[in-house]
Amino acid sequence: MSLVRVALGFSLAALIGIPVGLLMGASYHARKFLSLMVEMARPLSAIALLPLSIIIFKARTFSQLLGLEYLRYQKNLLNEMQLGMIFILFWGGVFPIILGTIQGVRSVRKMHLEAAGILGANRLFSFRHVIIPSALPDIFHGLKLGIGRCWMVIIAAEMLPGTNSGIGYLIRYSYQLSRYDIMLASIVIVAFIGALFSKGLESLGEKSLVLRSKER
Amino acid sequence: MEKNLSFSEAKKDDMTALKVTNLSKTYRESAGDVHALGPVSFEMEAGEFLCFLGPTGCGKTTLLRTIAGLEQPDTGEVIVQSPHYSGEPIIGYVFQQGALFPWMSIFANLEFPLKAKKIAQDTRRKKVESMLDMMGLASFASSYPHQLSGGMQQRAALARSLVMEPDLLLMDEPFSSLDMRTSQELQDNLRELLKRSSTTVLFVTHNIEEAVYLAGEVIVLGHRPGRIVRSETIDLPDPRSRLSDTFTEYLVSLRETFESLVSD
């Protein structure tokens, strides 16, 4: 359950974070305009926002959002996707992704852009074939940090009342039942999955990194 | 990118490929203005090989960058025209080093300019393949730049510029980062290649021997601000030999000019 929530929140963060980062990296005005907002919002811990997000989103879940009201009182996947939780996952993941992407776009070598221009590429073509590939290692780095954050946030969020599924819930529940064996096992699983996420994204990003770092 | 270039439609008997008038450039920096170049005026005919020779920091690169439209001149005008057909002339530029895209294979690097011009895929493929063959790079098509030696990388960079069939090819000390042997090998390649095409080449170097070996005309550029100090037509038979007496005469004579510049 935690995995599905993270997948949802993280994809949302990536889906919004990468384009925003690309825009902010590429356009001076967008950067000026958005960076203040990002810098103000970024230090706000996602956990701190959990009560607020519960107020805003109530206990709404994805089944309601999709208008599937009749699913409300059944136990199913959509019903476990509390909007508030997805929101704070998004919040936790999106900033490292934005910052990583900006960093990537800004670190494109000027010579490569000039070469592309002389070779007849217009701005869009350069963006697609020069800026994005050279930003890729940093984007992956941002994604890696982002998913780590998401994973931390979800465990904490699931420990709070109002949840009855997920690994965070399992840790808290086993603690209440004094089943420390289950609790410890869950913690190990959390660590293991966290590392798996990190390594997975790292190996995805590795190829682009190798190519960039070996350039002369 | 090409704001400072003006294109004029070529008249039938007008063989001028490049006309530079009163070009000058000053870099404004916090530490004070640096008058890097000019004013410089010169003309080139289509098919000519002109070499700018000058010590480091004489504004050679600035000159090329301004002609390519990468830099805005303070005064003066650059006119590039294609002698064969009207329309926007194609300019090629070979950087000192490292301008290949490291995340693309050599094939993809060569394909880049053709793709940018929206040339059909099979035509692209054919052009890239024949260029790779011609440059002896066919076996490296799927390699990445970092897997190639410095010489091979510059060869690929040259191939990438030539595959667009430029009217004017600008070369900024393209072989200066290579060892002498590799550098001479590439000089030979370049001469061979140019025999088969009508490309006009503007080459910039601080290496006197390279200039005399390659160029039809050598212009010596003085120290900051870069100004034309001497212009010399190199009248040597083809193929050129680096050991012939006349070659050495040119070398010595240009070296004298060069030394007088540095000691100033």
Image (cartoon, coloured by chain):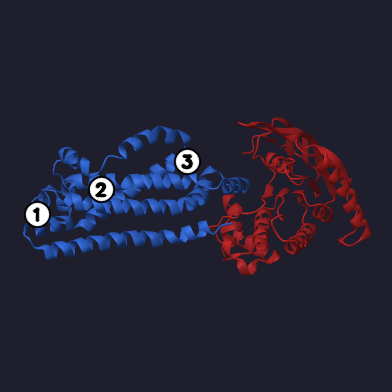
Residue A214, by quadrant, is bottom right
The chain coloured blue is A
Seen as rendered, the residue at the extreme front is: B263
Q: Which badge, 1 or 3, is on the more N-terminal residue?
A: 3
* Residue B244: percent from left, percent from top: 91, 61
Residue A181 point in image, percent of width and height: 13, 65
The quadrant of the rendering that contains the N terminus of chain A is bottom left
Give the mark nearer the N terminus: 2 vs 3: 3
- Identify the residue under disc 3: A26
Disc 1 sits on a residue from what chain? A
Question: Which label sits in the foreground, 1 or 3?
Answer: 3
**Residue receiving disc 2:** A89
Q: Crowding near pointer 1: few (<14 within 10 Å), some, many (20+)? A: few
Q: What residue appears at the point 88 percent right and 60 percent down from the top-left corner?
A: B238
In space, the residues marked 1 and 2 are separated at their CA atoms by: 24 Å
Q: Which residue is mark 1?
A: A74
Going from the N terminus, do you reach mark 1 or mark 2 first? 1
Q: Chain of mark 3?
A: A
Evaluate whether residue B15 shows in this view. Answer: no
